[in-house]
Image (cartoon, grey):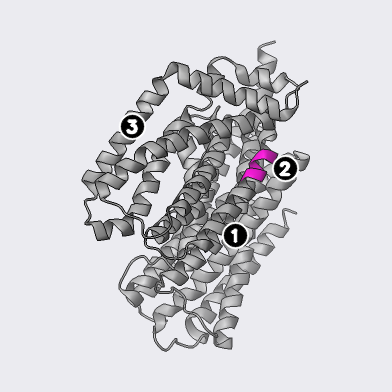
Amino acid sequence: MKRLFPILVVLTGILLSYGLYQALVVAPTEQTMGNVQRIFYYHVPSAWTAFILFFVNFGASVAYLIKRRPTADIIALVTAEVGVVFCTVVLITGPIWARPVWGIWWTWDMRLTSTLVLWLIYMSYLFLRRFSSSGETPVLAAALAVLGALCVPFVYFSIWFFRTQHPQPVVGGGGSIDPRMLHALLINWLAFSCFAFLVCWSRYRLEKLQRDVDHAHATASLLETR
Amino acid sequence: MRANPYLFAAYAATWIIHITYLATIARRYSRLAREVRELQK
Amino acid sequence: MSAPPSIARVTLLKDLRLEWRSKDAINSMLFFSLLVVVVFSFSFDPTAEESRQIAGGLIWVAFLFAAVVALNQTWAREMRNQVLDAYRVSPAPANSLFTAKVLGNFIFVMVLEALMTPLFIAFYRLRSLGPAWQLALVALLGTWSLVVNGTFFAAMSLRTRSREIMLPLLLFPISIPAILAMVQATTAILDSDPARFWIVLLATYDLVFTTVCLLLFETVLNAE
């Protein structure tokens, strides 16, 4: 298991480099926006990866509510944290893209708005984990995760309708996509998914160690007070 | 490599965010590992 | 052992009776409602035409504040007298307690809204171009969504640090689709535009979240 990690790091590094090459060199320049459009190859895969991570968080939370296994709880925590990191990337690259193209820093387009709401929901999840008393944290967090996940379809639906009523500039462009652009997009998505997996694995190991240490402390103080 | 400043800023921001997060994990891990060594003494 | 509906009814009546007797909460809420409307009127001083565009949002933000203040003290009395522990060991289903709390909060917040609405109409010279009964429907559905989630999150926040800030922190993000729907529906009705999509969305949201909160409340109550 331990030996697998460095191998995956190298593979992911290669994938990310290849993705970068695809995004900056191979993919054709977009007609209306020019080279700024290449932000697309980082902006969109980050959004999709965050989505996958939050989906895993939902699964782990449900699994925890049913079986109460600590592993499920740790996976829920880890995927939420890393998901928020990827969401942050989307929320930063979006405005950086919008500024030169539309002259504004923010636009209430579908992807940015829904990502913002998702970011808020999972940030509140992380706040609950930090502020609740440790005995009940896993159960409360799992319940919140279920509610948050159920909220997601409503978020997308409501913002979609709102946007059709009040059209906004779209970050990312619509319509059909050049196959070379699609190829670059998918490569970067694969690369970032692998990267996310490795980050989650690292965070998982950290959390596991933290809990083992806390457990050791607790046991030690119990023995002392005897 | 295209010299568009916004493009560079977006890619740089992405990696700064990821590396910062990884750095906090690494720092916490090394601190914990030290604590484990203390405990084992 | 009594059937669940009557336990809910008993708890609800007890809460309402306590509120009515104390009158503390009611009086401070009354004054709070007035303050909110006045402050908003000073902050946003639109013409009658503009006000119809933004009134929907303003009113619901004001209602949201009122709801949070009401929700924050919803479990306070139970906590002071260790009532929750008694509930946990009693054979009464947790859902009855939750239902009673939600209904009590709902009535409470609806009363506040009923007090604030005439003030808003007067201060903003509002006149609805669409049917007023639809506005009432939106008020009911919207308030329910805030109260059902709010009561649930208030129960979750009971043993957290910074309990009072935790409630809005948890409530606001998840309520965003509902808030968008409430505000858009209200604005549409005031302007005599179709609001059907938003009302249906709000009703669906209420259905889904009421069900899930009922399902999960027992788990949350017993979390430790």
Where residue A207 appears, as percent x and y from the top left, is: 63, 42
Q: Are discs 3 and 2 located on one and the same chain? A: no
Which badge, 1 or 2, comes first in the chain's sequence? Answer: 2
Q: Are discs 3 and 1 located on one and the same chain? A: no
Where residue A170 appears, as percent x and y from the top left, is: 43, 74
User: CB atoms at circles 3 and 2 under 8 Å apart?
Assistant: no
Q: Badge 1: how crowded within 10 Å, few (<14), some, or many (20+)?
A: few
Q: Is residue A193 left or right of residue C16?
A: right
User: CB atoms at circles 1 and 2 under 8 Å apart?
Assistant: no
Question: At numbered mark 2, what does the secondary structure look like: helix, strand or loop?
Answer: helix
Q: Is residue C50 left or right of residue B12?
A: left
Of the two numbered discs 3 and 2 in the rendering, the one whose residue sits closer to the viewer:
3
Q: Residue at x 48, y 21 (%)?
A: C19
Question: At numbered mark 3, what does the secondary structure look like: helix, strand or loop?
Answer: helix
In the image, residue C174 sits, relative to residue A186, either above or below, namely: above
In the image, residue C22 sits, relative to residue A180, either above or below, namely: above
Amino acid at circle 1: Pro
Q: Which residues are magenta?
A: C210-215
Q: Which residue is mark 2?
A: A64
Quadrant of the drawing holding the N terminus of chain C? top right
Question: Foreground: A197 or A50?
Answer: A50
Instruction: Give the spatial CA distance, label 1 vs label 2.
Output: 22 Å
Amino acid at circle 3: Phe
Q: Which residue is mark 3?
A: C32
Q: Main secondary structure of the magenta part?
A: helix
Question: At numbered mark 1, what does the secondary structure look like: helix, strand or loop?
Answer: helix
Question: Foreground: A11 or A204?
Answer: A204
